[in-house]
Image: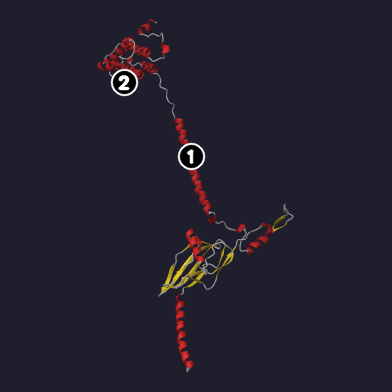
Amino acid sequence: MMQRATYAILIPLLLLLGVVDVAASDSRPTVRAAFSRDSVEVGDRVELILDIDKDRAAQIGIPRFDDALSGEQRRALQRRKAKMSSYEEYDEDLFELIAEEPLDTISEEGRKLHLRKRYHLAVMETGAIPMRPAILYFERNRETPDTIYVDDTLMLYVRSYAELDTTLFLKADPASQQGFGVDRELASEYLEDDGLYELKTLPFIFAEIRDYVTYGAIIAVLLALVVWVAVVMLRRWLAHRATMVKPVVKLPAHIVANKALVELNNRKLWQNGKFKQYYTSLASILRVYISDRWAIGALEMTTDEIISALVEVDIAVKSRSDLVALLRMADMVKFAKAEPDAEENELNYTRAYYFVENTKLLDEEKNEGKSDITIETNIED
């Protein structure tokens, strides 16, 4: 009877403990992992996939590669890892993180969540690489998290490129000038065993040099643009230099007037009945001369204004009277349509010429002892 009472107490107790244990195990997350490929070559990319089943209320931690962290985050992680002896992170020397996708919810079943985490990695070592991914489980009433590993260790097989040493394939060859040659059969066999092909049979892959071609094309275009700009600037500078005109030295007022008088005489205006044009030109030549010689605005002045402006100027009486007579005659022809005879026309031309000669600006040394040239003295000579 005593034994039956004991069993009657123990059996319900054991059943209760089993239910508690099952409930506790159901609340713990589970993790599975797999590589997208089980074998790659060194430098290839591979995807690591973590599938996590957890309760909606369970708190977990997903491992991250150091390459995805800042310097301060990396140091903080190292400090936390020092306190978590059971936490293991993926070896950063074996893999390089290319991209990391955010944690994704695949499905929901009541309180159960199916999550997925993806890592895009580049393989940096060769050989068989073992990996046992894990997550952190932050259980209630525990100071440190628990580490939950996948059930089976993952294996990734990484093949290496053959480091070809040509001295391994040399053989004696008396026909060769060097006395040895390459054993092509041995080299082909070695390359075939390693899963590679002879270099001469490898196809050309543009993608391998695409970046170099792109950068080279950009640099070539920039250099061509610089050369073109330099050529354009040089041509403009040469054209500007060719069209540059040296500063014109202003001729003395009397030389300009004398040249104009000679040109006027050669035109034979009054001889052809063009009295107005002749005297207008003759008066204009003297007005320009007076403006340049004494800085008087004679071009905009009337005859009386010119005579008044020259009152303060040191001019011989004969030269002054000749100028007045010439300007008065020019006004008569222009406004009264007078037609002087040939002798009067010649006389006025002579007056203009000697007015310029007797009033031109010369060095003082050349003017010493020189008297004015008059019409009368010229005729007597």
**What colouring does the structure picture have?**
secondary structure
Q: Is residue 330 visible?
A: no
Question: Residue 172 at what x, y percent from top left?
Answer: 73, 57
Residue at (64, 64) in percent of width and height: 193
Circle 2: element type? helix
Q: Nearer the viewer, residue 172 or 312?
A: 312
Q: Residues within 10 Å of mark 2 (few under 14, many from 20)?
A: some
* Nearer to us in this view, 179 or 249: 249
Look at label 1 and name its amino acid: Ala
The span from disc 2 to disc 1 (Cα, nearest Å) is: 50 Å
The answer to whether marks 2 and 1 mark residues whose Cβ atoms lie closer than 8 Å is no
Residue at 53 percent of width and 56 percent of height: 207
The amino acid beneath tag 2 is Leu
**Residue positioned 46% across, 33% down in the render:** 239
Farthest residue to the right: give it: 174
**147 above or below 75?**
below
Q: Quadrant of residue 139?
A: bottom left
Callout 1 secondary element: helix
**Residue 52 percent coordinates (x, y):** 47, 71
Residue in the foreground of this view, choosing between 52 and 29 = 29
| Left or right: 180 in relation to 122 | right
Disc nearer the start of the sequence (2/1): 1
- Relative to the observer, which residue lies in front, 81 or 121? 81
Q: Is residue 96 above or below residue 250?
A: below
Q: Residue furthest left?
A: 336
* 141 shown above or below 315: below
Q: Is residue 231 visible?
A: yes
Q: Residue at x 63, y 62 (%)?
A: 191
Label for residue 230?
1
Residue bearing mark 2: 299
